[in-house]
Amino acid sequence: MVKFGLQFKATLENVTKVRPLGNDFRWFLKLKCGNCGEIPDKWQYITLVESVPLKGGRGSASMVQKCKLCARENSIDILGDTISPYNADDSERFKTMVQFECRGLEPVDFQPQAGFAAEGAESGTQFPEVNLQEKDWTDYDEKVSESVGIYEVTHQFIKC
């Protein structure tokens, strides 16, 4: 078992607490087989609410898959207690947002989509429908009459 951290980096304008919303948040990943190195072309998603039993009664994981090239069974599990928000103080720096426990897989790419939430830095206004698929998001905080945004979203994976 190897743990990988997904580090998030963005420039925040008048927002804080950027985070995945709900246990059904979809983490879209590209995963590399640790045995043969195969990386499927398609994005795969995992969520906290989905749990699949592992062979041999060794617990469960968010996703279990058989490699199409070498037929090895691999798994990845979201470590729910590691999910943390990206705050205004973190702006323009990498911060680990979530960790994954991997058996035979390595995450190599992440595609942010809809399902993020944020909060107005000054006002506390909730923005529950933040879509980061375009790597940028903007809105307007009426409580403080300011534009808000998340820009230049990028990521990297680290071994934990």
Image: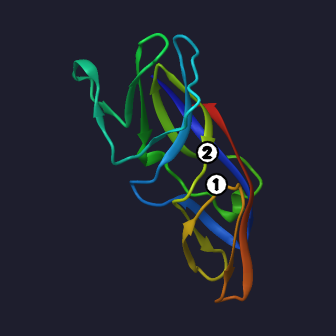
The amino acid type, in three-letter code, at marker 1 is Gln
- Badge 2 density bin: few <14, some 14–19, many ≥20, Cα 10 Å: some
Dot 2 and dot 1 residues touching (CB under 8 Å): yes
Is residue 137 found left or right of 61 in the rendered image? right
Asked if 149 appears above or below 135 in the picture, the reply is: below
**Rendered residue at 55%/11% (across/down):** 36
Q: How many marks?
A: 2
Quadrant of the image occupied by residue 139: bottom right
Q: Residue furthest left?
A: 57
The amino acid type, in three-letter code, at marker 2 is Gln
Is residue 78 found left or right of 120 in the rendered image? left
Residue 11 percent across, percent down from the top left: 76, 60
Asked if 86 appears above or below 80 in the picture, the reply is: below
Which residue matches tag 2?
A: 111
**Mark 1 falls on what kind of element?**
loop
Between marks 2 and 1, how big is the CA–CA gap?
Answer: 7 Å
Q: The N terminus appears in which quarter of the rendering?
A: top left
Foreground residue, 70 or 154?
Answer: 70
**Rendered residue at 37%/37% (across/down):** 62
Residue 133: mark: 1
Residue 34 percent across, percent down from the top left: 53, 16
**Rendered residue at 51%/60% (across/down):** 115
Q: The C terminus appears in which quarter of the rendering?
A: top right
Foreground residue, 4 or 27?
Answer: 27
Asked if 102 appears above or below 47 in the picture, the reply is: above
Is residue 120 found left or right of 69 in the rendered image? right
Asked if 94 appears above or below 34 in the picture, the reply is: below
Residue 31: mark: none
Is residue 46 found left or right of 123 in the rendered image? left
